[in-house]
Amino acid sequence: MDLLVIALKALAAQQALQTTRNTARGGLMAAALAPVGIGIFLIGVGFLGYACYAVLLESLSPAASALIVAAGMFLLTLCIALAMWLVFEGARNTPAPDLDLEPMLALFEKSADKMGDEIKNNPASSLMLAALAGAFVYVAFLNKR
């Protein structure tokens, strides 16, 4: 029975590792594309600022137009910083998923004695069935590329 508990915990750990790998891949992709997105965003903000400055020049002095555009850009920067802080603060406070193995362990404990007798009576068939079950678990859960 201890071997079954170890196997279930190993399977759960492997699933957690696979989830971590997938998350890391997504993080690496985001880190690779972030400079491109930031560059495009900054170019867009620059053109927006220039357009606002050009519109304000028609009715205000150049100094007043530049001051208003600079204040608007400062407020935009504060809003973006606040949004980023809220996103990262929420990600930091997200709890890790809890792996509950108790229902599976209870199910296996009920049938452990019956299976133990069958394994002792038919060792070759039991070994073949265990190999097939291991292959199924590998293909179904662990071989995610």
Image (cartoon, helix red, strand yellow):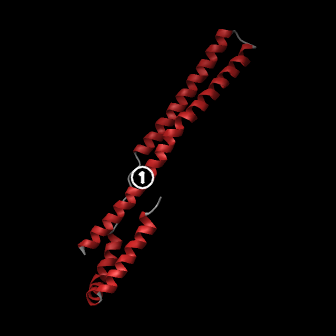
The local crowd at label 1, few if under 14, some if 14 to 19, many if 20 or more residues have their Cα within 10 Å, is few
Out of 133 and 108, give the one closest to the viewer.
Answer: 133
Q: Residue 60: give x, y in percent of width and height.
A: 71, 11
Residue sitting at x 35%, y 72%: 103
Q: Residue 72: give x, y in percent of width and height.
A: 61, 22
Residue sitting at x 53%, y 28%: 78
Q: Can you tell which quarter of the image residue 139 is in?
A: bottom left
Q: Residue furthest left?
A: 2
Relative to 29, is 6 above or below? Answer: below
Name the side, left or right, on which 106 lies relative to 75.
left
Q: Can you tell which quarter of the image residue 140 is in?
A: bottom left
Out of 12 and 57, give the one closest to the viewer.
Answer: 12
Question: Residue 97: in sight, yes or no?
Answer: no
Question: Residue 19: in sight, yes or no?
Answer: yes
Q: How many numbered callouts?
A: 1
Relative to 4, is 62 above or below? Answer: above
Q: Can you tell which quarter of the image residue 55 is in?
A: top right
Q: Where the N terminus falls, by quadrant?
A: bottom left
Residue hosting label 1: 21
Relative to 41, is 69 above or below? Answer: above
Out of 71 and 142, give the one closest to the viewer.
Answer: 142
Relative to 17, is 49 above or below? Answer: above
Q: Residue furthest right?
A: 58
What type is the residue that disc 1 sits on? Arg
Q: Secondary structure at mark 1?
A: helix
Q: Residue 113: give x, y in percent of width and height.
A: 27, 85
Name the side, left or right, on which 114 lies relative to 69.
left
Q: Residue 28: give x, y in percent of width and height.
A: 47, 43
Residue sitting at x 41%, y 52%: 20
